[in-house]
Image (cartoon, rainbow, N blue to C red):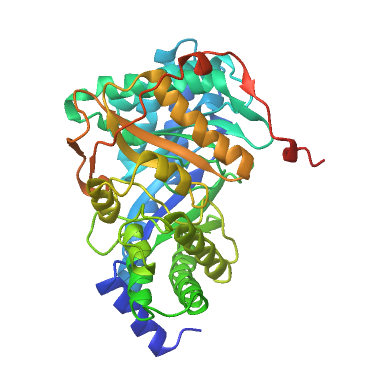
Amino acid sequence: MLNIFEVSETNKMIEKENLDVRTITLGISLLDCIDSNLSACNQKVYEKITTVAKDLVKTGEEIEKEFGIPIVNKRISVTPMALIGGACCKQPEDFVTLAHTMDNAAKAVGVNLIGGYSALVSKGMTKADEMLIKSIPEALHSTERVCSSVNLGSTKTGINMDAVRLMGEVIKQTAEISADKDSADCMKLVVFCNAPDDNPFMAGAFHGVTEADAIINVGVSGPGVVKTALEKVRGESFEILCETIKKTAFKVTRVGQLVAGEASKMLGIPFGIVDLSLAPTPAVGDSVADILCEIGLEYAGAPGTTAALALLNDQVKKGGVMASSYVGGLSGAFIPVSEDQGMIDAVKAGALTLEKLEAMTCVCSVGLDMIAIPGKTKATTISGIIADEMAIGMVNQKTTAVRVIPAIGKDVGEQVEFGGLFGYAPIMPVNEYSCDAFVNRKGRIPAPIHSFKN
């Protein structure tokens, strides 16, 4: 039971410290929509999404009004579309029609984004997987709300380097086709190692094949709340620092658990997980980088940054798991550059580099996220960056991801503007030495020895 002090404390977090529920994501299985006829498949997909999700936005708005908790996004994730279109799609253009159907269904029910234009190719690619991947640039360019993800590796299977090479080319094509808007289509495309089946955050959300027919997943976020709490223990010991983060993460996650339970009850759909990630926004005071500075760094990227981030990530998880029956998704700290004003400031000051961000991803939630790089960057170089991140995830048995934006026509010293939740980003320099001969080898990098546990 909540007492009056806790209610007051939560209200303060919402009003002054940017606490919000970042997303309610409704996962929908489309396995029963598979059909050998493309038109019939599209019709089934549209009807399933619009039927199951018809009350999602209304429910979210009702919860906001009743409890006074901001719910920033209402989203949908679906079964990876490479599986759904495998029987009916004969060319990449056929998959694009499924992307249009997803987009139309998302617009019909009023959600912000829909994820699941995805393929899972950590060990190999089917013809359908390859066609979907090749269709991604056109699919994202011709839709508004569709997000795409591709899982390229896992601890159990290794890294599919053929798919890594292909994705370097696809990311470059996606940037080129949207060059007139700062290559913004790349914001809706992410590649993973060890992608979770129940992630509620975009662009990586998809409804895993191990999930139920429909499920409610909630992502909470409160970097501003954590920073405010740490201001009160400035200069104290690591023990007090850790306890403060844990207690704050518990309170933030309880809000997510409350929203998830209410949404599940109102929609009649089972509750899946609460993802207790610290996800920043461009708003001042809603920054993970600012937390690192409050811990004791001049800028994110200074010596000690990886250790501070490891501490933060661990304490967030320790506090959060006590607050919810089911914790899942990614659960930790996100470090997207364009969406975090403190990270942007660190890049501009020269404190934060691509290599330092790569080191930081060894100990946090995702990886190289929302990073703008020069438009002249070669596709093979992008593939090399991806391979490095996939290796970190594979060896450390964790989820890693890459979401980079090669800003066509722009170079280091300039910036790209995305607006809204996506913010803006200074273009970061990339090591230009060639990895062509490495990337162009065929096959896959084997799974690490510690993956053989059976």
Residue 70 falls left or right of residue 196: left
Q: Is residue 265 visible?
A: no
Which residue of the protein is positioned furthest toward the bottom in this rendering?
4
Residue drawn 50% across the image and 47% down it? 199
Name which quarter of the figure residue 442 lies in: top right
- Quadrant of the drawing holding the C terminus: top right
Q: Position of residue 361 (x, y in %)?
A: 47, 46
**Closer-to-camera residue (362/297):** 297
Residue drawn 49% across the image and 67% down it? 257
Which residue of the protein is positioned furthest toward the top in this rendering?
90
Q: How many marks?
A: 0
Which residue of the protein is positioned furthest toward the right in this rendering?
454
Vertical side of 105 occupied by 200: above or below: below
Residue 60 falls left or right of residue 218: left
Residue 391 falls left or right of residue 227: right
Which residue of the protein is positioned furthest toward the front in this rendering?
303
Vertical side of 310 occupied by 414: above or below: above
Residue drawn 35% across the image and 26% down it? 100
Residue 440 falls left or right of residue 397: left
Name which quarter of the figure residue 109 lies in: top left
Vertical side of 284 occupied by 52: above or below: above
Q: Is residue 407 visible?
A: yes
**Closer-to-camera residue (135/213):** 135
Q: Position of residue 363 (x, y in %)?
A: 52, 52
